[in-house]
Image (cartoon, helix red, strand yellow):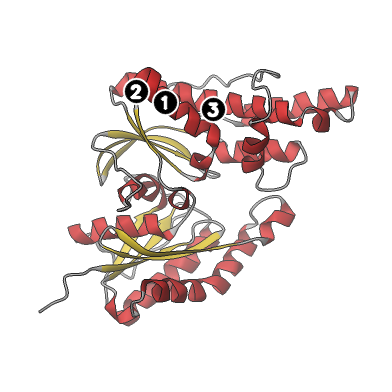
Amino acid sequence: MENPKKYILAIESSCDDTSAAVLCGTKVLSNVVATQEIHKQYGGVVPELASRAHQQNIVPVVHQALAKANIDKKQLSAIAFTRGPGLMGSLLVGTSFAKSLALGLDIPLIEVNHMEAHILAHFIEDENQTAPTFPFLGMTISGGHTQIVKVTDYFSMEVLGETLDDAVGEAFDKSAKLMGLPYPGGPLIDKYAKLGNPEAFPFPKPKVDWLNFSFSGLKTSILYFLQRETRKNPEFVSEHMTDICASVQHTILEILMEKLQLAVNQTGIKQIAIGGGVAANSGIRARLKDAEEKLGWQTFIPKFEYCTDNAAMIGIVGYLKFEKGKFTDQSIAAKARYAIGAN
């Protein structure tokens, strides 16, 4: 009798984290992430160094994921991998490895859109996680992306708005860099913001049509503000760090929440599911919780390990595609730019 269990090996290598996971159906058996520390000394991700680190990490990470799941590679039903979007050098490592392993094992290959995976991470089976029902609004906020997406089915998504320039995570990290904080600075802004006055220093919010975002102008206004104040007082930043961080975070969160409110008004959908690394920010979590009470929204936030870049979210999409027979072939190529719904 054939074993009904379907094991999916998933590989994620879109930026600077090498990750591999094994799923049995919708349940995660292992989710291993190798974080690249080298980028901290450069204040941001260096693409060439990232791809080299992926080459060093991918074999041991996959080996560890299989070992933690307690299965042999011969038991795998399919291999899912991140095709894009992301850094091309990084994507090529994961794509090439996945294609080679699938070919060697003679099992199906499944390509996954990284942005769709952030949204569908909500459907990973977990006792501490509740999945939204269709339709819902997905907001992906990370170092490389900011999007609001209308989700009517697993594979029916419409991008309602996205950033026209910088992503929200980049706005956090670069603002932190202007204050002399180490990379990644977003979590540090969140930490200091808890101790400061969010209305101490007002920053302008960019006016962008409809549901799109823009953060480059905000970064520029923060730069000019800090330059102006440090000319008057060289110790301004260190003396007012908590208030600056609180004010920067407050402005960014106001931008996000205003656009979400607009999306809810426009679609009538009050189920909000967020994902991406910035979903770990305590401020956005508090604002969403507040919206549940005041606006009647129902909000969903995945476990922290499924918010940041990870292979488990690639695996859940891989499983859903496996069930539908949505496979790809060896001619598939990585795509640095890969819009939701594109092929």
Whether residue 211 is visible, yes or no, is no
In the picture, residue 264 is in which quadrant? top left
- In three-dimensional space, the C-alpha distance between marks 1 and 3, rounded to whole angstroms, equals 10 Å
Q: Amino acid at mark 3?
A: Leu
Q: Are marks 2 and 3 in contact (CB under 8 Å)?
A: no
Q: Could you tell me residue 205's position as x and y percent? A: 59, 20
**Label placed on residue 253:** 3
Q: Are marks 1 and 2 in contact (CB under 8 Å)?
A: yes
Kindly identify the residue that appears in the image at 65 percent across and 18 percent down: 199
Q: Amino acid at mark 2?
A: Val
Is the N terminus in the top left, top right, bottom left or bottom right quadrant?
bottom left
Disc 1 is placed on an element classified as: helix
Q: Of residues 324 and 133, which is closer to you in this image?
A: 133
Q: Could you tell me residue 222's position as x and y percent? A: 71, 27
Kindly identify the residue that appears in the image at 31 percent across and 55 percent down: 317
Q: Of residues 340 and 71, which is closer to you in this image?
A: 71
Kindly identify the residue that appears in the image at 40 percent across and 63 percent down: 333
Whether residue 289 is visible, yes or no, is yes
- In three-dimensional space, the C-alpha distance between marks 1 and 2, rounded to whole angstroms, equals 6 Å
Relative to 8, does residue 100 appear above or below in the rendering? below
Q: Which residue is mark 2?
A: 264
Q: Of residues 278 and 243, which is closer to you in this image?
A: 243
First in sequence: mark 1 vs mark 3:
3
Relative to 125, does residue 289 appear above or below in the rendering? above
Q: Could you tell me residue 315's position as x and y percent? A: 34, 60
Q: Residues within 10 Å of mark 3 (few under 14, many from 20)?
A: some
Q: Which residue is mark 1?
A: 260
- In three-dimensional space, the C-alpha distance between marks 2 and 3, rounded to whole angstroms, equals 16 Å
Q: Could you tell me residue 73's position as x and y percent? A: 34, 79
